[in-house]
Image: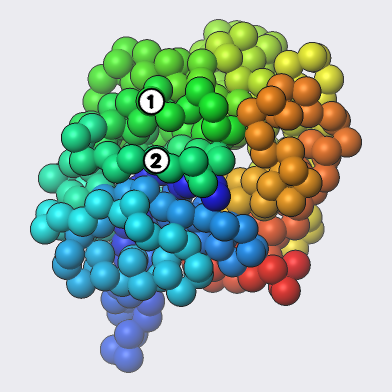
Amino acid sequence: MILCCGEALIDMIPTPTTSGSDGFVPYPGGAVFNTSIALGRLGVQAGMLTGLSTDMFGQQLADALQASHVDTSRVIKSTRPTTLAFVRLQDGHATYSFYDENSAGRMLRTGDLPEISAEISSLYFGGISLACEPGASTYAALLKREGATRAVMMDPNIRPQFIEDIDAYRSRLDSMMALTDILKVSDEDLNWMVPAPLSLKEKVDVVLGRGPRIVILTRGSEGATGFLSDGSNVTVPARRVEIVDTVGAGDTFNAGLLAKLYELGALQKAKLQTLSPETLTQALEHGARVAAVTVARAGANPPWADEI
C-alpha cells in the first residue's frame, strides 16, 4: 500500500448563482488528498494519513476518500475545524486564500501518529503540510521513523506565503530529502530551493547531492524530465489538451507516476536506486497521461483507470 501523508482540505470554488454573482461551492481537495484519490481511482492500493475534523467538511472529505477506495484507517479525527481554501480562477489558473489556523490537519503532533504496519510499502509526502507547524515537524518525524525501509516520494509544492521561518523550513526540507527516493519539483520549486545563478540542470545536480535518487522536474506545457543519480535523464512531453483548469494537475501527475512504478514492481527502495531510464520514461508518460485528463475538466477530478 502507498500511504499518502499530508493535508486534506476543502476548496471553496467560485460558482455563479441564480442572481448572477459568484458563490462558493465546497469541494474536497488538498495536494496530498488529491494524490491519494487519484491513486485509489487508478486501482492502486492507497491509504491516507492526515488529520480530519469531525465537522461537516471533515465528513465530506472522509466520504470522498472512501468513495475512491482510499483506506482511511490511519486518519486522525479531532473536533478542530477543517482547513478551507477559497479559490480564484483566472484563465484556468488557480490562486488561493487559506483559512488554516488551529485546524484538524495542521495541529497534528507526533503523539498522534499511528503505528505503520508492514503492509505499507511506500510513503508519499508533500504540499502545505510540509510548511505549516506543528504538522510539518510531525510529518518529518514520521518520515524519519518509517522511511528507512520504504520507498519515499516527496513533492514539496513550495508556497512561500506559508513559510514563516525560512531557515527552519529549509533545514526540515533538507532532512526529509536525505530520506527521499523520488523528489518531484516544478521549475519554480527548484529555483526557490536553489536560488544561486545556475542552470536548471545544475540546480538538479545540487538537489541530487542532498539525497534523492531520482529528481522529477516538471515545466508545465514543456513536459517533465526525470534525472537519475547516475547522471542520465529522460524527458517526456506534456499531453496537448484543451485546459479547463490546472487544479490538481501536479497531484494527479504524481499519482500516475507512482501507479506505473507500482504496477512495474519498481516502487521499492532498492529498485529505485538502480531504476532504468526506460522504466522512468514509462512512469513519466503515465503521469502525463493522467494529468492531461484532470486539466481537461473542472476541479481536481482525477480519472478512473478505465478513462486512461
* Residue at figure coordinates x 39%, y 40% from the top left: 116
Answer with left or right where residue 306 lies relative to residue 58: right
Residues at circles 2 and 1 in contact by the CB criterion of under 8 Å: yes
Colouring scheme, one of rainbow, by chain, secondary structure, one colour? rainbow
Q: Residue furthest bottom?
A: 18
Up the image or down, 146 lies above or below 105; here it is above
What percent of the width, then of the height, locates residue 74? 34, 52
* Residue at figure coordinates x 72%, y 74% from the top left: 306
* Residue at figure coordinates x 79%, y 14% from the top left: 230
Answer with left or right where residue 57 lies relative to residue 34: left
Q: Which residue is mark 1?
A: 145
Q: Quadrant of residue 219?
A: top right
Answer with left or right where residue 198 lies relative to residue 139: right
Identify which residue, 158 or 45, lies in the foreground.
45
What percent of the width, then of the height, locates residue 32? 45, 48
What percent of the width, then of the height, locates residue 80? 12, 54
Q: CA distance from mark 2 to mark 1?
A: 10 Å
Which one is earlier in the sequence, the residue at label 2 or at label 1? Answer: 2
Identify which residue, 308 or 144, lies in the foreground.
144
- Amino acid carrying label 1: it is Arg
Q: Is residue 161 visible?
A: no
Identify which residue, 162 or 304, lies in the foreground.
304
* Residue at figure coordinates x 25%, y 64% from the top left: 58
Answer with left or right where residue 150 lies relative to residue 146: right
Local packing at callout 2 (Cα closer than 10 Å; few below 14, some 14-19, many 20+) is few
Q: Secondary structure at mark 2?
A: loop
Q: Which mark is residue 116?
A: 2
